[in-house]
Image (cartoon, rainbow, N blue to C red):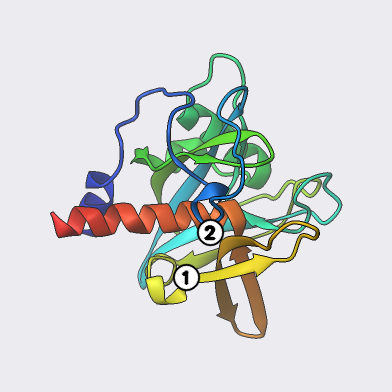
Amino acid sequence: MLEARIAACLDPLVDRTGGPGGSDHDLNPELTIPLDGLQEAAVLILLVEREQGLRVLLTQRAGDMRRHAGQIAFPGGRREAGETPWTTALREAQEEVGLDPSLVRLAGLSTPYRTLTGYHITPVVGFAPGPLTLTLNPPEVAEAFEVPFAFLMDPANHERRHRDQPPGPPRWHYAITWRELDQERLIWGATAGMLRALHDRLERADAG
């Protein structure tokens, strides 16, 4: 069963802060990634159960946000005092897209991700029956959509792209392009990096 296979590759629901994980450094070894003083955050990788298979809930951030405007992301945000990663992820998903936390079956934690912008992000993986009834928070979220889990886990769809940042060297990142009907969506940066890390966990688990 796919749900059991996914759950088996995850870490248990144990509160954690800091520690090793993936980062922008993975494809850019010359970059200095902060290790201390990072802001703890969490995101929800929600696997929506559909007749045609699992789909992943993603959002497009509002275009006028101060940081990462218009980018594609998982629901999530900063951890507040006393929260675990999963309570943060569920709270943020409720605030951003109106997701009822009671619908989510938590499965475990994926690989943390450290960003150059000073965040230590814990991805929380959960399952929910579809279709979802969502209510978007316009100041934060312009749109919510789903992408097939199988597509996101296929390494053939994982590109390595770069952005020129003179006078320094190009900065490399993972990117996944999802095309549906007449729309093309680019999933890149930390979001693509966390999806790649989940793929790697599944691959290691399957290899035994």
- Amino acid type, residue under disc 1 in the picture: His
As helix, strand or loop, the secondary structure at mark 1 comes to: loop
Indicate the position of residue 196 as horizontal and vertical percent values: 43, 58
Most foreground residue, 19 or 67: 19
Indicate the position of residue 75 as horizontal and vertical percent values: 59, 46
The image's mark for residue 192 is 2
| Whether label 1 touches label 2, CB < 8 Å | yes
| Separation of residues labelled 1 and 2 (CA atoms) | 8 Å
Most foreground residue, 117 or 134: 117
Q: Is residue 163 above or below residue 36?
A: below
Most foreground residue, 207 or 166: 166
Residue sitting at x 41%, y 22%: 15
Q: Residues within 10 Å of mark 1 (few under 14, many from 20)?
A: many
Q: Is residue 133 visible?
A: no
- Amino acid type, residue under disc 2 in the picture: Ala
In this view, the residue farthest toward the right is 64
Indicate the position of residue 138 as horizontal and vertical percent values: 79, 50
Instruction: Write down the residue under mark 1.
Output: 158
